[in-house]
Image (spheres, rainbow, N blue to C red):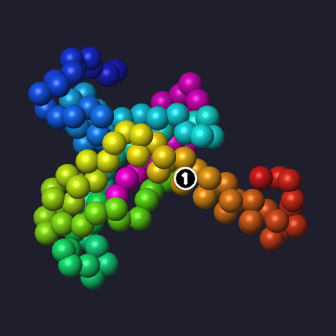
Amino acid sequence: MGQFKPPAPEKGDPNTIGGYMAVHSRPAAFEGSDGASYSVEIVTDVGNDEDPPFGAYLLFVRWRANDPVAVGHLETDFLAFGRKEEEARVKVGKLTLNEVKAVLDKLIASKKAELLAWSEAMGQEGTA
């Protein structure tokens, strides 16, 4: 069961993804253009021979309707890099909530295009 934690506006700008997570002590959630619910997290990892070495990206978890079960995910490529993980995370955290929502919808559209192309390649037009 979740806990209610009152917002702490002094922790950041709630209109950015990093600020929202700091102010509300939880990931942001969005309704995707496909009608599904998604929560988002900023993730860091070592980049591919990049300098600076750490990269950060957005991971969107897709939730089953009316059920707290994850049924999939979408993720971006690296969106920012830093010498330290926190530096890369802070850079991505400056994206506005509107920008993050636009990224999510672009990923959904891209995934639909991939599924449609696959069904057409398999001779299953109209099944996607």
| Residue 104 point in image, percent of width and height | 49, 48
Image position of 117 (left or right of 11) = right
Residue 69 seen from this side: no
Near-viewer residue (113 or 43): 113
Q: Which residue is mark 1?
A: 106
The quadrant in which residue 48 appears is bottom left
Provide the secondary structure element on which disc 1 rests.
helix
Q: Is residue 121 above or below residue 111?
A: below
Query: Magenta: predominant secondary structure element?
Result: strand
**Magenta stretch contains residue 12:** no
| Residue 32 point in image, percent of width and height | 55, 39
Amino acid, disc 1: Lys
Residue 77 seen from this side: yes
The quadrant in which residue 111 appears is bottom right
Where does the magenta region start and end? 57-71
Q: Residues within 10 Å of mark 1 (few under 14, many from 20)?
A: some
Near-viewer residue (45 or 107): 107
**Residue occupying the point 63% across, 40% down:** 34
| Residue 9 point in image, percent of width and height | 17, 25
**Magenta stretch contains residue 63:** yes
Q: Is residue 57 above or below residue 26?
A: below
The quadrant in which residue 124 appears is bottom right
| Residue 21 point in image, percent of width and height | 26, 36
Query: Which residue in the rendered view is the most extreme toward the bottom?
Result: 49
